[in-house]
Image: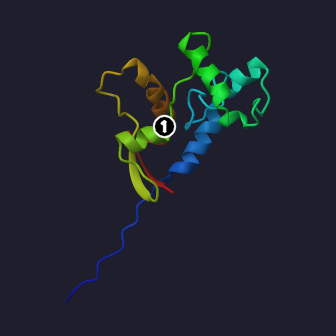
Amino acid sequence: MLKKPRKHVKEYWDFDEICHYLEEKHSVDLRDYAGKFSGEHSFDAWCDKKGYGQIDPVGRQRGCSSIWYEKFNADVAEGIWVEAPYLDFWHWLTHNLDASRQRFFTLPVDYFKNIKVEEDQKWLVEILEMFKEFADEKGEIYCYIS
């Protein structure tokens, strides 16, 4: 007699819930870890320091102002202003670990365990360290990315 297969059930974490929890717990933004778009080294902070309002002299919004971006880029190039680097954990996951929305994914929190960590990767080690409280005994988090 043919036996009907049984249904398998596996527990998983909700990736977005973990991210929101860690962001609040550690006061970080995993999508803008260095504050490029909202921190003290952002374009907005530079504009505020210069005393610029929300509209430039030709009527463009701050974020669309080619006048102010040109001056900002000149200050960065001359070392007058230090721009924060682009550090987006989600984009790192999609480019390096094939993560994507609407699927299950295993996050290896010990990803850098046997790899020499370069200076520009230390932020990733910091973030993965935060995730460790959700990892299993193999150092992995099985989660669903909605």
Measuring from the top left, give residue 108's x and y in whole percent: 37, 40
The structure residue drawn at horizontal position 28% and vertical position 83%, both measured from the top left corner, is 4
- Would you say 55 lies left or right of 121 here? right
Q: Nearer the viewer, residue 106 or 48?
A: 48
Badge 1 crowding class, 10 Å Cα cut-off, few under 14, some 14 to 19, many 20 or more, is some
The structure residue drawn at horizontal position 48% and vertical position 26%, both measured from the top left corner, is 123
Measuring from the top left, give residue 107's x and y in whole percent: 40, 44
Measuring from the top left, give residue 58's x and y in whole percent: 75, 33
Q: Amino acid at mark 1?
A: Phe
Measuring from the top left, give residue 140's x and y in whole percent: 38, 43
The structure residue drawn at horizontal position 44% and vertical position 58%, both measured from the top left corner, is 11
Q: Give the quadrant of the N terminus.
A: bottom left
- Would you say 121 lies left or right of 3 here? right
In the image, residue 69 sits, relative to residue 106, either above or below, namely above
Q: From where the camera sits, is residue 137 visible?
A: no
Residue that lies at the very extreme toward the front in this rendered image = 58
- Would you say 11 lies left or right of 17 here? left
Residue that lies at the very extreme toward the top in this rendered image = 79
Give the labeled residue for mark 1: 89
